[in-house]
Image (cartoon, grey):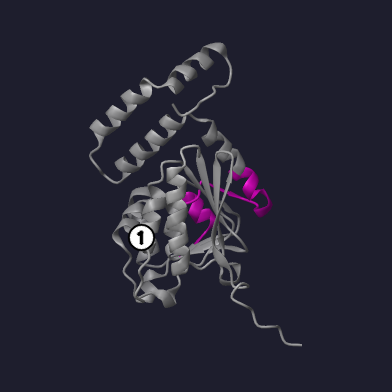
Amino acid sequence: MSEPARSNADLGQIPSLTVEGSRATVQLRRPHHHNRLEPADLAALMEIFRTVEADRTLRVLVLTATGRSFSAGYHIGAFGQAESGPTLEAVIEALERLSVPTICALNGSVYGGSTDLALACDFRIGVEGMKLVMPAARLGLHYYPSGMRRYVSRLGLNVAKRLFLAAEPMGTDALLATGYLDEAVPPAELMAHVDRLAERLQAGAPLAVQGMKKALNDIARGEDVDVEIATRAAAVAQSADFAEGRLAWREKREPRFTGA
């Protein structure tokens, strides 16, 4: 008996946003196509990131996916088509510039432009046995500047050349050695490790965590922001959260930060 044809619904849906307390979770949902990114997904992700940035109660964002792969990258067939929506580069830049810290939970292998989507997150936890492939050179594709800058600043020039010029596949051990992955865990343990990291990030003082995230990313981009960082640090030093942090330290208890 032949397999019934799949409907559009079977092929997947645009990414979803779930909010639980101060944690936002974004999930890619096209498992039958290894979570390939379509133009509609880029529009949905951009709107999600705008929503997250506007919600001052959020403290962390987790990006993950359904199925056996994290993402096969941007749909090759969509390149060159006239689009009115956001580009992949714009979406990934919006992700990197989110105020809240971000964790990518790589539930499987990652390819193409989605390697940069994960790299734009502050932390990456993957599953054992996953691999990364950046096939731009094999496709005749010149990658966009902000993505290459991110690879060089975060992984180093030599690693970036191996990935972009030689299109060298990297397995789990290499991804750990190069710093692309912070951790690699058995698939059944992935979300438990992500939860623990998310809880640590949520426990920090929001003004300090978000301010230092921005500072570190600006420094990595080579931007001259010393005055801006110093001004922000001085403001945080006057915050109610810093006062609460010092009081909790003296009283030997967990602080209760409010983001003020």
Q: Which residue is mark 1?
A: 89
The residue segment tinted magenta is: 169-194
Please state which of residues 188 and 156 is positioned toward the viewer in this rendering: 188
The residue at the point 42 percent across, 70 percent down is 135
> Is residue 94 visible in this depiction of the protein?
yes
Q: Secondary structure at mark 1?
A: helix
Magenta includes 122? no
Dividing the image into 4 quarters, which one contains the C terminus?
Answer: top left
Residue 259 picture location, percent across and down: 46, 29
Q: Disc 1 marks which amino acid?
A: Glu
Residue 245 picture location, percent across and down: 48, 20
Above-or-below relation of 233 to 12: above
Q: Quadrant of residue 151?
A: bottom left
Crowding around mark 1 (Cα neighbors within 10 Å: few <14, some 14 to 19, many 20+) is: some
Residue 75 picture location, percent across and down: 45, 72
Above-or-below relation of 245 to 149: above
In this view, which residue lies farthest toward the top? 250
Above-or-below relation of 160 to 233: below
In the image: residue 232, left or right of residue 62: left
The residue at the point 65 percent across, 52 percent down is 186
